[in-house]
Amino acid sequence: MGDFQKKFSLKGTDVAGKTLGIIGFGKIGKEVARKAALGGLDMRVISYVPRPEGKEIPEYVEIVSWEELLQTSDYISLHVPGGEKNQGIISKKEFAMMKKSASLIQVSRGGVVDEEALAEAIRNGQIRGAAVDVFSEEPPQKDNPLLKLEQVILTPHIGSNTVECMDRIALDVAEDVHLVLSGKNPKHPIKR
């Protein structure tokens, strides 16, 4: 069994009333915002949207500048696509702007966060901690500094590993196959 006395030395924080900064306001980012603001978490939700013109922004989400998001968020959740343009968008400069009590949630794509800079920011007390589901290299090397930090929660790229999600993916694929065989464009084209 575990050490039940350890509970007296462990303290968490409530998320109610805290600010969630969302970077990447697509389908997933919008759903995270909805659940954080309206789904019982009672959080203030802000987002950085580079070109908000014409985008549907719910009334419970405040659009802010990049700097304001980094400086005021208690939690920063990443939902941006991978690719060259987003590589290392969160690095030393960004960690230096964050609150010491901030936590980073990396659930987008590997390489979006500079992992060495993240580990350094946590070791130096620039930010409180992180939750990481995706890595620059998967599986991460044994010398990855994030693996040695108690303030980091690590999962092996399983953010979508639910029975229901796998069913939805299978259905989407089947629908796209049907569309292509019918001479139509798929709803979810493969990006190359």
Image: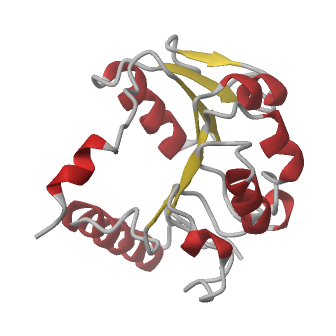
Query: Is residue 56 among the parts visible in the rendering?
Result: no
In the depicted structure, whether residue 2 falls above or below residue 45: below
Q: Position of residue 123 (x, y in %)?
A: 69, 56
Q: Position of residue 149 (x, y in %)?
A: 56, 65
Quadrant of the frame with the N terminus: bottom left
Query: Is residue 97 among the parts visible in the rendering?
Result: yes
Horizontal side of residue 40 vs 65, given as left or right: left
Quadrant of the rendered image containing residue 158? bottom left
Given residues 51 and 32, the one toward you in this image is 32
Q: Position of residue 166 (x, y in %)?
A: 28, 69
Quadrant of the frame with the C terminus: bottom right
In the depicted structure, whether residue 183 falls above or below residue 29: below
Q: Residue at x 63, y 27 (%)?
A: 73
Q: Position of residue 176 (x, y in %)?
A: 42, 70
Q: Residue at x 67, y 42 (%)?
A: 127
Given residues 127 and 63, the one toward you in this image is 127
Horizontal side of residue 5 vs 14, given as left or right: left
Given residues 163 and 175, the one toward you in this image is 163
